[in-house]
Image: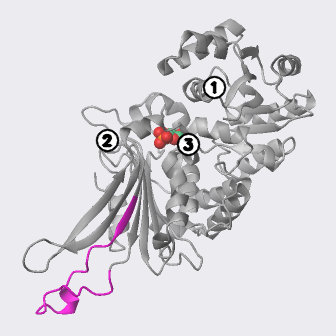
Amino acid sequence: THENHALFIIFGATGDLAKRKLYPSLFRLYRKKNIQSHFAVIGTARSTWTHEHFREVVTESINSLHPTKQELDEFINHFYYQALNVANTDEYVSIQELAESLDETYHLEGNRIFYLAMAPQFFGTISQHIKSEGIMSEHGFNRLIIEKPFGVDHTSATQLNEEISAVFDEKQIFRIDHYLGKEMIQNIAAVRFGNNIFESLWNHAYIDNIQITLAESLGVEERGGYYDKSGALKDMVQNHILQIVALLAMEPPTVFTDEAIRTEKINALKAVRVYNSDEVKKSFVRGQYSSSDHHLAYREEAGVDPDSNTETFVAGKFLIDNFRWTGVPFYVRTGKNMTEKGTRINIVFKSTPINIFRSIDTPICQTQKLPENVLTIYIQPTEGFSLTLNGKKIGTGFDIDPTKLVFRQSVENLENTPEAYEKLLLDCLNGDATNFTHWDEVEQSWKVVDVIRHTWDDETVDFPNYLPGSMGPKEAFDLLEKDNRSWVWEP
Ligand code: BG6
């Protein structure tokens, strides 16, 4: 492994994300020797912590990875803390001085990663100070990692982008969408572009529809305050789902480089139809969970307005207006408190033109079409693929029997799979932006989502409308039924 030299400056170092994802990921990279003796971390946040206290918190957060005493001692000594009130210039000066001295101590070669793991309203101020107080290094690289939400609509996203772009250029900005770090999301490209049997059929002539489900079994947990202002559309569709749509719909890049892929993803997203409000009403439905014996209703959750009209479920149909995809619906759905946690993609191929196995006495108009071939990509918790094929039922006669070829990653492999954040941090260290979202992608996604949001905001809605543990409201099923289709996955 190549040892990277870098300083990580984490804004929001006391927060949930840092503790749950960033420190464990850094530790895993350390264990794999992607970072070793030439790295350092400066944690910053409002609280006045000592380096020692910070190190205790980091230790706690990697506890479940069972570090040996030696590993822990070596790793933890690279962590430093500086309190920061984001508007206080003096504290940025302290960060700058600490950064310079750590650079010397650990031979960091002037490489810096600024990780904004905190509320986006401060991104602008922080970036400005990073520049004005000279925290960007003059030798080595400067890279900015930012978390979602990237704005709350197109206007605010544009403003946010202008603020960070005044300091960092697009090549230095790494916008996280953690779905892009998932093994099976990255596998979409492998399945499509590594298998001619699929890529040559990957278009409107052979595909009937595509279904993307991101179901969650949990409710909003302790994030009611954030979620009530966001809702499922902004929380999942604007980012994760539209990124998956882009990966499924894009043209083959000429080579597998970040620039070539981004270009194709942007083209795909630009072809996603931006609906008018009549089209939104026909193509998108929303839901909010009620109570059940074991669950509070969404409106009863902590931090949620008791009259809230925020959606905890969305289902909809995207259309892509280009040569490849005209007429092929991309059905999507996501929600909280659904039957089970399950993220999967179903590619439904067209059935054969006629069913030649029909009984000779039955008029053609009354015969059933053969079941469609379905390619399923299981993203999580199962990771794998399946393909349904029609075969002959064993025995006399000639009945058709659909069978399923299934591949699942073994439990052993899954345990060794790097976590999304670990991969994304390493990509950033390597300067590889393939699995991050470019500004043009973010911008286009907001344009698509804004009209849905505005249409909904102008309408009254009858919430709650689905039971915890279900696959969403009736409307989500009607949506496909009126197109003479149904959801392939019915847990
Ligand atoms: C986050 C959303 O982006 O993704 C959460 O804010 C959601 O609401 C989460 O629970 C789902 O991620 P994962 O990796 O658990 O599927």
Which residue type does callout 3 highlight? Ser
- Whether tag 3 and tag 2 are in contact, CB under 8 A, the answer is no
Q: Nearer the viewer, residue 257 or 236?
A: 257
Q: Residue at x 67, y 6 (%)?
A: 52
Asked if the residues shown at circle 1 and circle 3 are in contact, with their CB atoms under 8 angstroms apart, the answer is: no
Q: Which mark is residue 464?
A: none
Within-10-Å neighbours for mark 2: few <14, some 14–19, many 20+: many
In the rendered view, does 277 fall on the left or right side of 367? right
Residue to which mark 2 is pinned: 468
**Label ID, residue 230:** 3
Choose top left, top right, bottom left or bottom right for residue 398.
Answer: bottom left
Magenta segment includes 393: no
Give the dominant element type of the magenta stretch: helix, strand or loop: loop
Residue under pointer 1: 30
Left or right of 107, for residue 238: left
With respect to residue 228, does 242 lie above or below?
A: below
Residue that appears at 17% across and 86% down: 358
Q: Quadrant of the N terminus?
A: top right
The residue carrying mark 3 has its beta carbon less than 8 Å from ligand 1: yes
Indicate which label's residue lies in the foreground, 1 or 2.
1
Provide the secondary structure element on which disc 2 rests: loop
